[in-house]
Structure formats: structure tokens, C-alpha cells
Image (cartoon, rainbow, N blue to C red):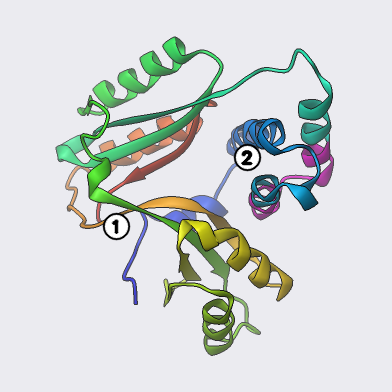
């Protein structure tokens, strides 16, 4: 078993307010735009786009929004070009933090990320300062229902090529190699499982205990509220 645990991931995913969902949809819209530009608008021919669509559906993004985003990215010559930039730093009490962004203005994004780190009592670091503490994995959280059998989910996941499976309390977690993520996700999707979330994440090799929980949570919330920030990974113990 992986023993991997995230900072209230399931609670945060399910407890989104309408305003927070709007921010999530904006972030996913950017991912759709990047996926379309890199591999075209046909999901059947673009695995990256299929993964983003699955992520959008897990976030309850309306189909109209998804297809409108694809059409916009494919049809507008003047569409915005987003750049992927990854920031590394330290949160409260030295917690290692990686912030993945998609931005059309890197100066604005860098200033905002630095401000959030500083405000939380942390500091923006240099490239590579904390990434060595993390391993990249495909992570799929499957929602538990009265009809969901742990043994069945585990067997389906392992047969699909997953590396690991664990019961995380409110959901089942499936880990994959990054290269196998799409195939495993699609196999489980075909089995009609409901995903809480599905994506490629950075998993810490070790965790640190945080005493100033409120300050740390506020930092995560500020990153969540930024349209430019796509994902935040850290090694804080739940």
C-alpha cells in the first residue's frame, strides 16, 4: 500500500463553493486550450485532451463549457497562448511546496506567487530546491458508493496497469506511472467508476508535521484562488 495521503483532498474537492467552482472551471479552461493547441481538438486523437476532459467532468464542469472551450481554442487565431511555469519554495515551518501555473503574463504570476509565499511566512526558492523531494505519479481518486467493492476496484485497477491501490477513507486511491495514467484512467472510466479527481501529481517522499495549520491552509486557499495557479503540491502531513 502506498500510504499516500493528501491535505484534506477529498473534503476540499467536494466542498467547493460556487465561486470556487468558477475558479476551477477557469483553470480547466486553460488546460483545455493548451491541450488543443498541442494535439488538436479531436479527443479521439489527443490523449492529453481526453485527460483534461475527464478532469473537467470530475469537477462537474458542464459539457457546454467543455465543448465551447475546445471550439474556442481550435478556432480563434487570436486565442491566448499560455506558458507553463513551475515555482518551488517553502511554506510555513519549511514545508516544501511546488506550484504549477499556466500564465499569459509570467511577470504578474511570479509576483503573485512570491507574494503568497511571503504572506504565509514562507519564501519562493530556486528551481530544483524542493522538487527532488517529490515523485511524479498518476493519481486517481475513486468515489466510494454502497455498491463499490474494494476488491473489485483493486482488481480492475491492477489489471489496467496501476502500480498501487489504497483505501483513503472517503475514496479509493489508484497510483500509476505517468506514462500509464491515461490508459488506466480510461479503463476505470469504462467500468463506470466515479472519480473525485484524476491527474498527474507530485507525491512527496516524506512528510513534515505542521503546527500552524491555519496559516498553511490560508496559503493553499490563496493559491487556489489564483487563476494562474493550476496545481499545488506539498509535503505537509495531514
Q: Which residue is mark 2?
A: 21
Q: Quadrant of the N terminus?
A: bottom left
Rendered view: 150 above or below 123: below
Q: Which mark is residue 66?
A: none
Queried whether the magenta region covers residue 55, the answer comes back as: yes
- Image coordinates of residue 29 in percent, x first then y, are 67, 33
- Numbered circles on residues, count: 2
Q: Which mark is first along the chain, 1 or 2?
A: 2
Q: Nearer the viewer, residue 129 or 169?
A: 129
Q: Is residue 24 above or below residue 5?
A: above
Q: Which residue is mark 1?
A: 238
Up-down relation of residue 138 to residue 172 (above or below): above
Q: Which residues are magenta?
A: 53-67
Rate crowding at label 2 as few (under 14), some (14 to 19) or many (20 or more) other CA atoms within 10 Å. Answer: some
Of 52 and 221, the residue lying toward us: 52
Badge 1: few (under 14), some or many (20 or more) residues near its Cα, within 10 Å?
A: few
- The residue located at (34%, 65%) in the rendering is 4
Amino acid at each position: 500500500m502506498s500510504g499516500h495521503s493528501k491535505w484534506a483532498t477529498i473534503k476540499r474537492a467536494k466542498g467547493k463553493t460556487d465561486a470556487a467552482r468558477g475558479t476551477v472551471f477557469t483553470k480547466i479552461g486553460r488546460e483545455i486550450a493548451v491541450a488543443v493547441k498541442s494535439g488538436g481538438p479531436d479527443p479521439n486523437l489527443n490523449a492529453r485532451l481526453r485527460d483534461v476532459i475527464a478532469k473537467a467532468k470530475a469537477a462537474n464542469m458542464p459539457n457546454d463549457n467543455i465543448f465551447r472551450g475546445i471550439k474556442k481554442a481550435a478556432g480563434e487565431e487570436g486565442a491566448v497562448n499560455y506558458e507553463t511555469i513551475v515555482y518551488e519554495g517553502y511554506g510555513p515551518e519549511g514545508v516544501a511546496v511546488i506550484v504549477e501555473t499556466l500564465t499569459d503574463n509570467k511577470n504578474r504570476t511570479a509576483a503573485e506567487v512570491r507574494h503568497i509565499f511571503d504572506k504565509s511566512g514562507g519564501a519562493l526558492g530556486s528551481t530544483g530546491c524542493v522538487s527532488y523531494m517529490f515523485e511524479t505519479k498518476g493519481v486517481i481518486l475513486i468515489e466510494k458508493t454502497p455498491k463499490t467493492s474494494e476488491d473489485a476496484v483493486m482488481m480492475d485497477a491492477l489489471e489496467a496497469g496501476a502500480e498501487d491501490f489504497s483505501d483513503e477513507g472517503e475514496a479509493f486511491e489508484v497510483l500509476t506511472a505517468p506514462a500509464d495514467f491515461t490508459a488506466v484512467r480510461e479503463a476505470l472510466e469504462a467500468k463506470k467508476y466515479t472519480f473525485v479527481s484524476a491527474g498527474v501529481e507530485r507525491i512527496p517522499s516524506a512528510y513534515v508535521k505542521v503546527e500552524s495549520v491555519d496559516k498553511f491552509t490560508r496559503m493553499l486557499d490563496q493559491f487556489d484562488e489564483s487563476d494562474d495557479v493550476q496545481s499545488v503540491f506539498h509535503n505537509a502531513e495531514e
